[in-house]
Image (cartoon, grey):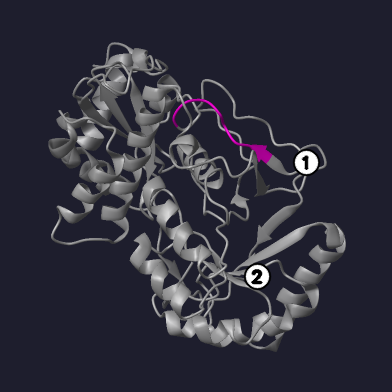
Amino acid sequence: MIQNKSNRRSWLRAMLYGPAALVGLNAASSIAKGAPISPKDKIKVTKLETFVLKNSWVFVKISTDAGIVGWGEMLKDDAKACAAGALEVGDYLIGKDPRPVLHHWQAIHRGAFYRGGPIKSAISSGIDQALWDITGKCYDVPVYKLLGGPTRHSAFVYGVPDPVTGVRAMKVGPRAARQAFKYTEGKKFIDEVVERFAALRQKYGDGVDIGLDFHGAVQPTTASLLIKALEPYHPWFYEEVVQALNVDVMADLAKKTHIPLATGERIFLKWGFREILEKGAAMILQPDVNYAGGITELKVIAGMAEAYYAPLAPHNPNGPCSLAASLQIAACIPNFMVQERGDREYDLLAEPLPPVRDGYRPIPTGPGLGITIDENRIMDEVGEPREYKTQYDPDDGSVVDW
């Protein structure tokens, strides 16, 4: 029988992730920031822990012998696999100085025979965020100051239009009475999507930018019809018009419209984005700091994109580390465009983020990622992650994208 809340949490973590996840667990130390240290002082990693939440967010916490801890986030679709894989990296990382972040990124990536992919890249991403968080805290500076910033003091965000926050940009899907699950949708479906988008444009007027997210769930035959039919209503961009597995198809669709295409949330590492840029498949890149390679890799991807005059609009449907890490990137690259869900607030923080004003979120200036995770609140949400269920065509039972 579980005697108290702390024991219950430990038992739950053991059931979800096995005994390795319990090594050194100390929820009471969650908010301790540690003190800055001299560049000449020694510091080493002592512990790596993972936390899978019921909403499928995955966190990694790295502790050091200096009392400084770092936090990061990972892919949510394969939550438990990412959590377990990150614990294995502890065999490499524990005992090492956390501050040579790029060296560790290379070691984790190139030390594996099989490279890339969502899970392996997500593991690197979460650990990379946590190592940068530690490094910034060691020197009492935000991460962007270690990466050449600042290039700006605040980040334009999109989310929910609101006169209080000044948010004036949003994103929607191709709305109709049902999802676009047919290989080629007919005129009735196309007209309904256009009618609803036109009504949204009329409601918000020209003062609100409205992106359209196809989510890779619309087949190219239908996407080619929609991108032309929606042009008169001036979408801000078309996102993931098709799956990113065949870049040539996306590049072909890009040539058929003057509306910029955006993609990136299912693309990993610099090598995945290389083909997108070279083939002109998208003008706006949307890498996710939780599984495109972390802060280290997003900085590189931004540099590649700059050579093609392509801006970054980082993907972010995730938690506070994801947003904070994305904002650190926004603060140290020249070609930042907008932050997805940048207006979101989180109850997992000991202190709130700087509030959004006039549509912009101020870049956090605290050390590391600039946020303080409340581990007690994290532990309250630990549990079996939300399942992502397969979607089916209700007419014939075939599997469809979602």
In the image: residue 271, left or right of residue 1: right
> 10 Å neighbourhood of mark 2: few (<14), some, or many (≥20)?
many
Indicate whether 14 appears above or below 79: above
Q: Position of residue 65 (x, y in %)?
A: 23, 18
Residue lying at 70% horizontally and 66% vertically, measured from the top left = 236
Residue that carries the numbered disc 2 in the rendered image: 174
Q: Which residues are magenta?
A: 361-368
310 w.r.t. 256: above or below? above
Q: Residue at x 18, y 35 (%)?
A: 93
Q: Is residue 80 magenta?
A: no
Of the pair 261 and 317, the residue shown nearer to us? 261
Instruction: Tell me what residue is drawn at x 35 percent, y 14 percent.
Output: 29
Q: Are marks 1 and 2 in contact (CB under 8 Å)?
A: no
Q: Determine the secondary structure under disc 2.
A: loop
Q: Position of residue 127 (x, y in %)?
A: 31, 40
Residue at 26 percent of width and 22 percent of height: 64
Residue 63 relative to residue 289: left or right: left
Q: Earlier in the sequence, mark 1 or mark 2?
A: 2
User: For numbered disc 1, what is the local secondary structure?
Assistant: loop
Crowding near pointer 1: few (<14 within 10 Å), some, many (20+)?
Answer: some
Q: Can you identify the residue that label 1 sits on?
A: 358
Whether residue 400 appears in this view of the structure is no
Quadrant in the rendering for residue 204: bottom right
Residue 109 position, x and y percent, is 22, 53
Amino acid bearing label 1: Asp
Q: State left or right for residue 44 relative to residue 207.
A: left
Type of residue at label 2? Answer: Pro
Q: Which of the labelled discs sits on residue 40, or is there none?
A: none
Tell me, yes or no, whether the highlighted magenta stretch contains residue 365: yes
